[in-house]
Amino acid sequence: MAKVDLTQQVEAYRARVGRFDVVTVPPLTYLMVDGHGDPNTSDAYRDAVSSVFPLAYALKFLSKRELDRDYGVPPLEALWSADDMAAFTTTRDTSRWDWTLLNLVPGWVSPEHVEAARAQVARKGGAPVLDAVRLEPFDEGLVVQTLHVGPYDAEGPVLATLHDEVIPGRGLRMTGRHHEVYLNDARRTAPERLRTILRQPVEPVEPVEPELP
């Protein structure tokens, strides 16, 4: 049985340092859970991570066992937002952040599969917000993205360039929530080696019609 690498099948999971690429993310399906606050200190964030991954692995093994289809559990992702974009780029006020954790799942996974996997995880315990994790399609569409290598707290200047220079310079404007894909496990990787895809949904700026005399 061949193991499928879900991220290798989607161009948007490939990014390069120093380049800002415009790509279209196809509709995908994720495990999701919402929360608020500093990801470094928030119990809510820690509980969310501790619930998403057990469910993701239970789902993977259920797929392998019952559907004869195997895949690698992809890396953690997150959508971020705040009432002021400066909370991301300059002040880095993490206490104001709203987030949604994501974990990509294959299209053949059904809600019934998720509920069966959830029941398995619940019997084992240790997933504090298991009931809050949901299966949801996400059609992100057009985005601009780059690869950041280094500590998460050093993302600010890259994001400022993305938001203030690259996106308007290409005739685009920001639409959806800031998206990060964490290609390494932060618990096992030195901060300077962390690799993170920074992604911002966009749309074309409509041309301004000239005023009639």
Image (spheres, rainbow, N blue to C red):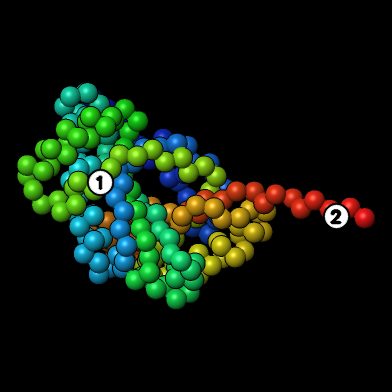
Quarter placement of the N terminus: top left
Q: Which label number is shown at residue 133? A: 1
Kindly identify which residue carries mark 2.
Answer: 211
Structural crowding at the residue carrying mark 2, measured as other residues with C-alpha within 10 Å and reported as few (<14), some (14–19) or many (≥20) = few
Q: Nearer the viewer, residue 152 or 18?
A: 152
Give the residue type at disc 1: Val
Going from N to C along the chain, the mark reached first, 1 or 2, is 1
Marks 1 and 2, how far apart at CA: 51 Å
Q: Nearer the viewer, residue 90 or 22?
A: 90
Where residue 113 appears, as percent x and y from the top left, is 22, 30
Farthest bottom residue in view: 91
Where residue 162 appears, as percent x and y from the top left, is 55, 61
Residue depicted at x 31% and y 46%: 32
Residue depicted at x 89% and y 52%: 212
Give the residue type at disc 2: Glu
Quadrant location of residue 180?
bottom left
Q: Nearer the viewer, residue 14 or 35?
A: 35
Count of marks overlaid on the render: 2
Structural crowding at the residue carrying mark 1, measured as other residues with C-alpha within 10 Å and reported as few (<14), some (14–19) or many (≥20) = many
Where residue 92 appears, as percent x and y from the top left, is 41, 72
Quadrant location of residue 35?
bottom left
Q: Residue 43: in sight, yes or no?
A: yes
Q: Residue 183: in sight, yes or no?
A: no
* Left or right of residue 147: residue 182: left
Farthest front residue in view: 213
Residue depicted at x 28% and y 29%: 110
